[in-house]
Amino acid sequence: MPVHTRTKLNELDNLHGVVISRCYNIMKLWGFTQSEIATVLDISTSSLRRYLANPDNVRLNRDRHDRVSYIINIHIGLTSLFSTNETIYGFIAKPNHSDFFSGRIPKQLLLEGSMENLIDITRYVQRLSEGGIL
């Protein structure tokens, strides 16, 4: 592998700690506890603490990387939809009566730890932020 390619891959590896920290901060603003964040990311609480304490040593596997990416994308969609922190950060914790959620609370769905729920919520928020009627 060419040296410049290996260097770029190493630089991307170093971003794992940055994205896990960003994801953690978003989820804290959504009202998740550290234990709940670990559940959604499908890692142990001790691993999450270790990641946060030593971000330069974080190496996320594909599943965890995808989970973190979905959380960040949900947040990006919410910030494009809403103009106040109350609605941006409150959306996840409030019952939603759209056809998709049918009165369920997005946070409860996330706490099931299912990748499918992460994907579905991300798609829902993205469609909504793109002007889709749901």
Image: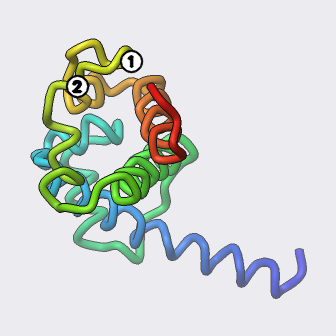
Q: Secondary structure at mark 2?
A: loop
Residue 88 sits above or below residue 106 on the image? below
Q: Nearer the viewer, residue 131 or 87?
A: 131
Q: Which residue is mark 2?
A: 96
Q: Nearer the viewer, residue 12 or 75?
A: 75
Tell me, yes or no, whether the two marked residues, 2 and 1, touch with CB atoms within 8 Å. Answer: yes
> Quick check: 117 left or right of 53?
right
> Which amino acid, mark 2?
Asn
Determine the residue positioned at 21% across, 41% down.
Answer: 91
| Residue 65 placement (x, y as % from top left) | 50, 51
> Quick check: 76 left or right of 51?
right
Which quarter of the figure is the N terminus placed in?
bottom right
Q: Which residue is mark 1?
A: 100
Label 1 Cα crowd, 10 Å radius (few <14 / some 14-19 / many 20+): few
Determine the residue positioned at 26% across, 29% down.
Answer: 106
| Residue 28 placement (x, y as % from top left) | 15, 55
Residue 49 sits above or below residue 104 on the image? below
Q: Secondary structure at mark 1?
A: loop
